[in-house]
Amino acid sequence: MKVFADLHIHSLYSTGTSNKMALENIDRYGEMKGLNLIGTGDFTHPKWLKELKEKLIEVENSELYKFRKRSSEIRYMITGEISTNFEYEGHIKRIHNLLLVPNFEIAEQLIDVLKNYGDLSLNGRPELEISASEFVEIVKSVDQRVEIIPCHIWTSHFSVLGQKGFNSVKECYEDQTENLLALETGLSADPKMCWRVKELDKFPLVSNSDCHSPYPHRLGREANIFEVERLTYDSLIDAIRGKRNTGFEMTIEVPPEYGKYHYTGHRKDRRYLISGMWKLHEVDVCFHPREALKLNNICPICRRTMTIGVLQRVEELADRPDGYIPPNSTSFIHLIPLTELLMYIKNTSSPVVKSIWETYISLIQHFGNEYNVMLNAPKDEISQIAGPKVAEAIIKVRLGQIKYKPGFDGVYGGIIFETKKYEQQEIHENKRFKGQTKLTDFS
């Protein structure tokens, strides 16, 4: 069977997460998206664990679960993200890790151990005072079948290879590196970027949404496609590893430019101190690595070190040229969430306004789910339902023919439909710097 899996999400008990992140909404919107396997997220939080145990029922002999209140085909795997906080060579490191857990019994055994390193009730993604390598060792000592995946490995903050992380996976996880199941690319990177670092060849690369909202422009925006004979916890783990009669077919990736940390820069309205007074950036500062390096990564506005983007961090660690493809690598495709694509086409301020939602629902009702629309639906049929502009845009996304304005310093990127209009806006913003430097380089 074909499996569309998003294994990294959060509940309403995580900081900065929508109060709509309840199972009722996750199941409903997950079905619209086309997911049939979703990670529960946040299993270490006592209130969320209580809800999970009340609302989920195990599917026989699978160590996966389904939602009691709806008849969807979605299965759930017990998962959670853990922040390991520790000092390394005089610097504080905060590394996020995704746990995949076979069942509630083992989940509760893990909780009994992990509560010794931090308060699990404060946040759905708890912060534990323990090194990343010690964390992996302790988790594996509870049960060898629990799997660990370093999260969003390139993101500027809270990641193993980001600006405040390490220069290699081995440096972070030490002798526990071999116990990692896979690596998660994150929204601002894709497998092509990871392939430039030889060390990463030994790990499968997975993609997940890390969503904080259940709406389909967040849930499942990144995902994994597997082919298994029967969907169980073990068959999914085997598929990631490429074992038995299973297949890890591809990952669904948001274009890296669309992520929040692709380029280097400082966002507008960031506070900075100058001459003893707090001020705000009046404009966004966003640079391609070539331009950032010319400035020694110093922001021309606040004179502080900029947030180093994922693209620049990859360049720093790369030991292969751009375009290298390792043998036996898993393929991937770039997709934009359908409601966000409609937002740009219809020029609305939000992907969940009524006009967008009506078009979205009409496409879902006809084609079954969003992934089918974006990956398989014929152009002429899309056009009959949503119009030729929508059909053309979907096909262009599918074929990789869309350009994007890169995200930076916590600001999402965007789709560029009207190139001339965008270039005029860029020229206007550059003038506000009075010729100090070029803001962006999208070549």
Image: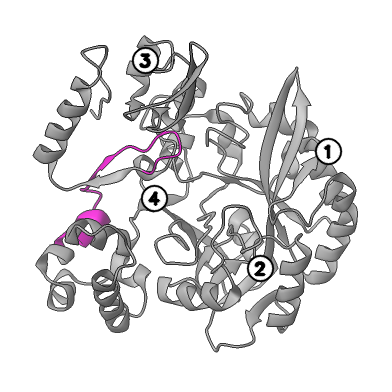
Q: Is residue 202 left or right of residue 4?
A: right
Mark in the foreground, 3 or 1: 3
Which amino acid lies under the numbered mark 1 shown in the image of this protein? Answer: Glu
Say whether marks 1 and 4 touch (CB < 8 Å): no
Mark in the foreground, 4 or 3: 3
Q: Position of residue 209 (x, y in %)?
A: 50, 56
Which amino acid lies under the numbered mark 2 shown in the image of this protein? Answer: Met
Q: Is residue 88 left or right of residue 412?
A: right
Q: Position of residue 18 (x, y in %)?
A: 54, 62
Q: Secondary structure at mark 4?
A: loop
Q: Position of residue 318 (x, y in %)?
A: 48, 24
- Residue 432: which quarter of the image? top left
Q: Position of residue 368 (x, y in %)?
A: 35, 80
- Asked if the stretch drawn in magenta spans residue 46, the answer is no
Q: Earlier in the sequence, mark 1 or mark 2?
A: 2
Q: Earlier in the sequence, mark 4 or mark 2?
A: 2
Residue shown at the point (75%, 53%) measured from the top left? 122
Which amino acid lies under the numbered mark 3 shown in the image of this protein? Answer: Pro
| Residue for badge 4 | 254
**Crowd around label 4: few <14 · some 14–19 · many ≥20 (10 Å):** many
Q: Is residue 62 above or below residue 435?
A: below
| Residue for badge 1 | 134
| Residue for badge 2 | 77
Mark in the foreground, 3 or 2: 3
| Residue for badge 3 | 300
